[in-house]
Image: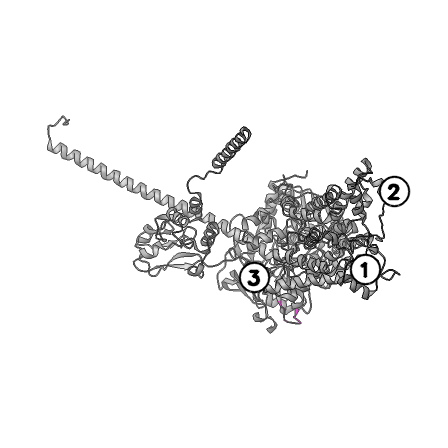
Amino acid sequence: MNMLASSALPSVAASPHAGQLGSVSHVMLKVMLALAPATACGFWYFGWPAFNLWLVTVLAALAGEALCLRLMAKPVVPTLLDGSALLTGWLLAVSLPPWAPWWLGVIGGLFATVIGKQVFGGIGCNLFNPAMVARVALLVSFPVVMTGWVAPIGLTGAQAPGWLESLQLTFGGSVPDAYTSASLLGQAKTELSRGVSLLQTFANGLPVSWSGMRPGSLGETAVLLIAAGGIAMMLMGLITWHIPVSMLLAIAIPAAIGHAVNPARYLDAGAHVLSGGAMLGAFFIATDYVTSPSSRGGQLVFGAGCGLLTWVIRTYGGYPEGVAFAVLLMNALTPVIDRAIKPRVYGRNWRGQPIAPRKEN
Amino acid sequence: MLVPVVILTLLGLMLGLMLGYAARVFAVEGNEVAAEIAAMMPGTNCGQCGLAGCGAAADALVAGAAPATVCPGGGAPLAQAIAAKLGLTLDLGGLADQGPKIAEVQEDICIGCARCLKGCPTDAIVGASKQIHGVLHQACTGCGACVTECPTGAIGLRPLPQTLQDWNWASPSFA
Amino acid sequence: MGILERLNGGRWGVHPHDDHKRPAADTPLRVMPLPAKLCVPLLQHVGAPAKPVVAVGDSVLRGQLIAAAQGAVSAPVHAPSSGVVTAIGPVTAPHPSGLPFDAITITLDGEDRALEAAGVDDPLALEPAEVTRRIADAGIVGLGGATFPSAPKAQLGRKLEVQTLVINGGECEPYLSSDDSVMRHRADDVIDGVRILMHAVGARTALVGIEDNKPEAIAAMREAARAFAAIRICPVPARYPMGSDRQLVEVLTGKQVPAGARTASIGVLVNNVSTCAAIHRALRHGEALYRRIVTVNGGAVAAPGNVLAPVGVLVEDLLAFVGLKEAPARLVMGGPMMGLALPHAQVPTVKACGGVLALTAAEIARPAPSACIRCGSCVKACPMGLQPLEIAARVRAGDYDGAASLQLDDCLACGCCAYVCPSNLPLVQSFQHAKGTLWARAQQKKRNALTRELADARRERLERDARERAEAAAKRKAARAAQQASAAAPGGQEMPS
């Protein structure tokens, strides 16, 4: 019976005495896995410069996190291993113009983890999505670089820069004009502001693309792979359909109505949903746990708000794209939504009062 | 000339009315905080704090003249509640190792003089002269007024034993 | 879980990936040989503790009453075997605090002499009140873990004209299979108990909810209930906490129990299958509740399985019977989700103890807690629809009232939130702590009200005494003055003006 010597029992603990043994790093790893195909596709379309930018941005995000943790005398390595800073840098990188210079990635990466996250208290405490905070900061600070799109010329195509050339592109000078191209939303905004109707601008058809072979941010053009990654996250139980579906519907429905009323002024639903990072935003950005509501009802409201604001900003605002702004605005509303919309508690009505007993007879 | 004057006058009037309304709606009658704190206290006016009753102690607390640990009967839980209410930092040094206490009569020393009965603010001691006295656990606040009354030292305060019912989990440490 | 349900985040509760019920559930039932002594606790139920009716030195027989019920909600305690009462007093309770509670210690003589027991041939012919009385006399309490005495419960059901009995065969906790074992091996007893209980309550139908991970139990119970149309065997999905009365009632009847109310308020009474088997034995055989089937399981147990053991057996003796293959890292009474960690093995079992687990370090290992990432897993898992992450944030900040405003009271402490939490936060402990603190505050408030009332009464009395004394003194003085006056002026008829 010496196996039961009371000294052998460690201090008692509260139930449950079992668990799923999950961890934050598991969660982050799964999200990265879901994001990987679309990112790889981005590398394939936009070549080595895109990869360089991604690497620089991710490293900068990690460095920013490590710096803050060191300054606050918190454990550095375990926190970096939770993968959240890596994911933040990754999400920022895929939302940048693929051939952007290295310093854009560095500033963005540092901004994301230092200002967007650690200033608020680190993981779980930030009010705004750090990647989108950094993206918006870059957009308002360096508008020209942030809208310098390139046509997808492939990783190995004849025109594509080789690895050495790519280093020169990323770390050297600026993107040669020969490569630059306009995005659909940017073109629409520019031409509309000059008074040219959309019917005229896109007389040869809208340059929408399911495959992602179009100018755009590093990892947002491969919409099918993004959607596949999103559905994979749902099947893994990481996210639910509420935010992505409500966000995409809230973009598509007003777009469809506007287009039906005045096709010369309003882009159609397909153009809105398939470009400008709407898919990336719906599946990977707006679904960020920390900055979105925790109840299903709240998530529907949040997603719908993101979608509607995206469409409003794109259509009536000064910027051609609106996902980042829309997500940040709704992030600010998340605490309010969480306060206002709670799940119905068992045996209570929506207002929290006990339901009336209903007898069976 | 006339328009700005009128506008400023109206603005002043409006803001004044708003202030007046706010003063009426958010009016504080008497010292509510003191009343709330008095309600939190045992209310036995046992005088162990050295002040004239619980009301006086509450006033002293609000005025900052007494520490949050002023009430011996209330113990650590009351001190914590008061500190939270008044936003004080709490030093439980003097109280930390003392849980709630109640009076206990040592029956072999008690001579049945019944003096403690008169001293108890809550009539928590039962008995009559020439009979051994007992303490009603529910009614005793542990103020200790009886201890000083007892001529033979038969009454002492003993810590209330912890039971399964009032045992509680400690607050866990989060990350 | 279907794909659509998965996209929606799943329904409440958790699906423990490995419920660890087998192989223990499939091993034959063993009867534990009598240990040297038993410590039979006086408080094994909700309500007032039983009052000993034996003294140290008394000889007792199996089934003999050793402590009587006190008050309306209480239950008597019977001797599980024959022997001599060697102590009546505190022993360590099966509770993480390690605090003592009172128990009657019986040193067994090993002869297991039984008291003459008288059963009834046809309990269904008895008056319902008589059935309830016999249930009360047998000391039967809810064996699912709630430990509410069964007799007052049945009375309440009769008073509220409950029409439906829900019989809880959920047993959703991983590792445990004692109810499963009762249903497999004693299905006829259970069904008979259900019929007796229906008679006592006056219910018309009984729904027996059994999780679909117990096909053998479902088959045995279907066979036993075949002849009785009023008793329906309803397989329910295996999902923790299906065995919680509120969840089971909703799944079986489609109705929710109002917050803060009993199931009887919606015309349903929930009883555990083991309770029904105990009722059968009490009525048909006159056997009091002094033994039960206990699952002994866990990675450290050499031969896990179900054991028929006397109430009050020490966990130490129980584990010695099944054998240990390694030193357990934690002993748990109950299941792993809601069971209580034991301070050591020298604690007795109680009537409601359906399982004793000896878990290894690997089984209880959990990574250190990290920051909440607001993933919302706990919100999806909570069977009550609460927001554990929000409540925990308030508890952490010391805002207990804020936690209460998020309906902390409705928390079952089922542990689903902590089970799924990727940050491994001690959610259940923080809720228990908050509930305990709120309870202590409420108690203090009550106590304050009482002492204040007493102090006021005393002040009034002292004032009244003083007034009366003053009045009496004044009266005496007046009388004396009048006397003096009459003495001074013998013929005086007029007062000087």
Magenta-colored span: C322-329
Q: Position of residue A89 (x, y in %)?
A: 71, 59
Looking at the image, residue A312 sits to the left or right of residue B167; the answer is right
Amino acid type at image mark 1: Phe
How many marks overall?
3
Residue bearing mark 2: A203
Q: Position of residue A174 (x, y in %)?
A: 77, 58
Please tell me whether residue A101 is drawn above or below residue C122 in the rendered image.
Answer: below
Instruction: Determine crowd level at label 3: few under 14, some 14-19, many 20+ residues with C-alpha closer than 10 A.
Output: many
Please tell me whether residue C429 is drawn above or below residue C330 in the rendered image.
Answer: above
Residue bearing mark 3: C96
Amino acid type at image mark 2: Ala
Observer able to see residue B28: yes
Distance CA(mark 2)–CA(mark 3): 76 Å
Distance CA(mark 3)–CA(mark 1): 57 Å
Verify CB contact (< 8 Å) between mark 2 and mark 3.
no
2 or 1: tag closer to the N-terminus: 1
Please state which of the two labelled residues, at mark 2 or mark 3, is closer to the viewer.
2
Residue bearing mark 1: A43
Q: Does dot 1 land on a helix, a strand or a loop?
A: helix
The chain containing the residue under callout 3 comes to C
Name the residue nearer the viewer: A289 or C84.
Answer: A289
